[in-house]
């Protein structure tokens, strides 16, 4: 691999970077650093946050070293979710601890709607952390614009090979496989801990396993375990589903191909995670580094004929979710069956660092004993073009899921328009029907809806959407 810079940064990029640096170095009194909570016993931890792209559950085969470390010696959250199954909204929820209807990034084009003063990287840098970003940031973010509140960064314009980057304010092309470049840039950032006594925060986000799912050359022909699908792949009788799902054409063969391609790209992520562990061990920082690993959304492998994200079905919003922090008491290798989500990451990191944020957050620290009985998951259709998933929101519990579709859409800025009329509804008994094959509202009478508790669920969903 060679790193060959070929394009200097533009004046616009330089000025944007200067503004970002000025904003990042200003220290307004908007957060409090407390010597209480988990950080008090362990000292402020280093923080390594790894966010993969489009990685669904059931991809552990490709991540044996990652799973052995972060799940085997940390915490495996078995009910991990994202609150919007789309890249930029989900990542904005990771940064802010807020639902998309509160942070405003409702689609991939609305990255600049995020209030950067509410982000975890802002709070951590203000509190004295050394901050770094390595990989993908937010869809629609202009590459020449430096990401606010990151002291060092290698921001990727998403691609797998010979991609464009903004490295500390210089836009350039770097030859090589981007997961390897993310790994090496992160390792160089970690190495500075040997001489820089500040705690650090590294946001590490390779492009894997997003389409086109190009594997590293050494893994291009790797055989993956066979897969016979699951009952929802494909669901033959979709008469009880919304029109866009009734029209879906994904097959088991499609799902197998996507799965194999995703697994091959994730093999390189596993190599990178192992390299991070080895580096932390060599630095003597393994015990007091809080590591969180999550996919930014899931992906459907032909479930209900669908071969993408964006839908309220479980493969699209359930994700792998691991946490390790031995010095904070999370190093024993346990399973946690609470309903947890990407909105819980920022509160967790700030809790560990002893920081009380000034801005409100919808999530709760995973270091606390808080347990929710359900989660709001939401999605907005962008534009008026036919096709794709309509706008929807969903009440998701362990044993049931209730979804409403709406006559609503967003523009590129994330602004919502439409009548808001409910156009379709689904209810699934997840305990008896985990693959969401039978929509119990299809043809249901008012009495049957009442027996299912639909009026109460609709009320709770409305309350969640407006909170």
Image (tube, grey):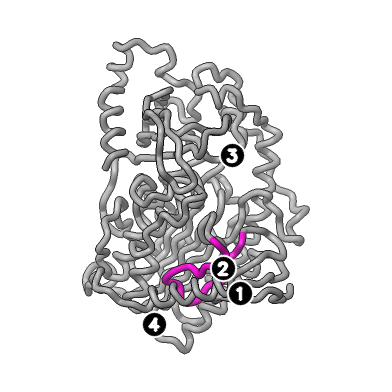
For the C terminus, which image quadrant?
A: top left
Q: Badges 1 and 2: C-beta atoms under 8 Å apart?
A: yes
As drawn, 316 above or below 278:
above
For the N terminus, which image quadrant?
A: bottom right
Q: Give the Cα separation between the discs numbered 4 and 1.
A: 29 Å
| Residue 465 drawn at (x, y percent) | 31, 38
Query: Of 354 and 119, which appears nearest the observer?
Result: 119
> Badge 2 is on which residue?
144
Q: Give the Cα separation between the discs numbered 2 and 4.
A: 28 Å
Query: Of 233 and 328, which appears nearest the observer?
Result: 233
> Badge 4 is on which residue?
198
> Label 2 crowding class (10 Å Cα cut-off): few <14, some 14-19, many 20+?
many
Query: Of 133 and 364, which appears nearest the observer?
Result: 133
The image quarter containing residue 248 is: top right
Residue 143 belongs to magenta span: yes
- Indicate which disc residue 389 carries: none
Pick out the residue farthest to the bottom: 195
Question: Is residue 66 in view?
Answer: yes
Q: Give the Cα separation between the discs numbered 2 and 3.
A: 29 Å
Q: Which residues are magenta?
A: 142-157
Give the foreground label among 4 and 3: 3
Q: Tell which circle, 3 or 1, labels the residue nearer the N-terminal end.
A: 1
The kind of secondary structure the magenta stretch mainly shows is loop
Q: Looking at the image, which residue is at 65% across and 68% down?
A: 180
Direction from residue 180 to residue 77 in the image, left or right = left
> Badge 3 is on which residue?
308
Question: Is residue 320 in view?
Answer: no
Helix, strand or loop at mark 2: loop
């Amino acid at each position: 691999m060679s790193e060959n810079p070929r394009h200097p940064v533009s004046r616009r990029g330089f000025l944007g970077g200067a503004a970002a640096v000025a904003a990042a170095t200003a220290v307004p009194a908007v957060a409090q650093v407390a010597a209480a909570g988990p950080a008090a016993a362990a000292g402020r931890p280093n923080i390594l946050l790894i966010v993969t792209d489009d990685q669904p559950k059931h991809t552990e085969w490709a991540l044996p070293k990652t799973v052995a470390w972060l799940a085997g010696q940390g915490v495996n959250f078995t009910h991990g979710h994202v609150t919007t199954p789309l890249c930029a909204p989900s990542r904005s929820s990771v940064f802010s601890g807020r639902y998309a209807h509160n942070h405003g990034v409702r689609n991939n084009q609305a990255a600049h709607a995020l209030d950067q003063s509410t982000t975890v990287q802002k709070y951590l840098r203000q509190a004295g952390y050394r901050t770094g970003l390595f990989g993908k940031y937010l869809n629609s973010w202009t590459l020449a614009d430096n990401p606010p509140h990151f002291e060092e960064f290698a921001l990727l314009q998403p691609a797998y090979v010979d991609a464009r980057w903004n490295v500390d304010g210089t836009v350039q092309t770097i030859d090589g496989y981007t997961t390897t470049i993310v790994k090496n840039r992160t390792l160089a950032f970690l190495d500075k801990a040997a001489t820089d006594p500040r705690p650090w925060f590294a946001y590490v986000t390779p492009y894997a396993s997003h389409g086109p799912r190009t594997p590293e050359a050494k893994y291009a022909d790797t055989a993956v375990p066979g897969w016979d699908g699951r009952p929802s792949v494909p669901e033959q009788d979709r008469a009880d589903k919304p029109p866009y799902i009734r029209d879906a054409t994904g097959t088991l063969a499609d799902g197998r191909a996507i799965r194999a391609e995703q697994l091959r790209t994730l093999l390189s992520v596993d190599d990178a995670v192992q390299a991070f562990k080895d580096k932390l061990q060599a630095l003597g920082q393994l015990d007091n580094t809080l590591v969180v690993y999550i996919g930014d959304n899931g992906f459907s492998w032909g479930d209900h004929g669908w071969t993408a994200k964006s839908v309220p079905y479980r493969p699209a919003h359930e994700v792998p979710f691991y946490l390790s922090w031995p010095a904070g008491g999370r190093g024993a290798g346990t399973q946690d069956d609470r309903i947890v989500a990407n909105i819980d990451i920022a509160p967790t990191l700030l809790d560990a660092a002893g920081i009380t944020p000034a801005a409100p957050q919808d999530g709760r620290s995973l270091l606390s004993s808080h347990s929710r009985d359900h989660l709001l998951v939401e999605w907005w259709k962008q534009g008026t073009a036919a096709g794709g998933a309509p706008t929807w929101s969903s009440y998701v519990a362990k044993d049931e899921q209730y979804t409403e579709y709406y006559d609503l859409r967003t523009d590129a800025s994330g602004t919502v328009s439409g009548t808001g009329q409910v156009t379709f509804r689904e209810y699934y008994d997840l305990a008896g029907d985990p693959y969401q094959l039978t929509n119990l509202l299809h043809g249901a009478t008012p009495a049957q809806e009442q027996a299912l508790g639909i009026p109460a669920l609709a009320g709770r969903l409305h309350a969640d959407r407006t909170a």
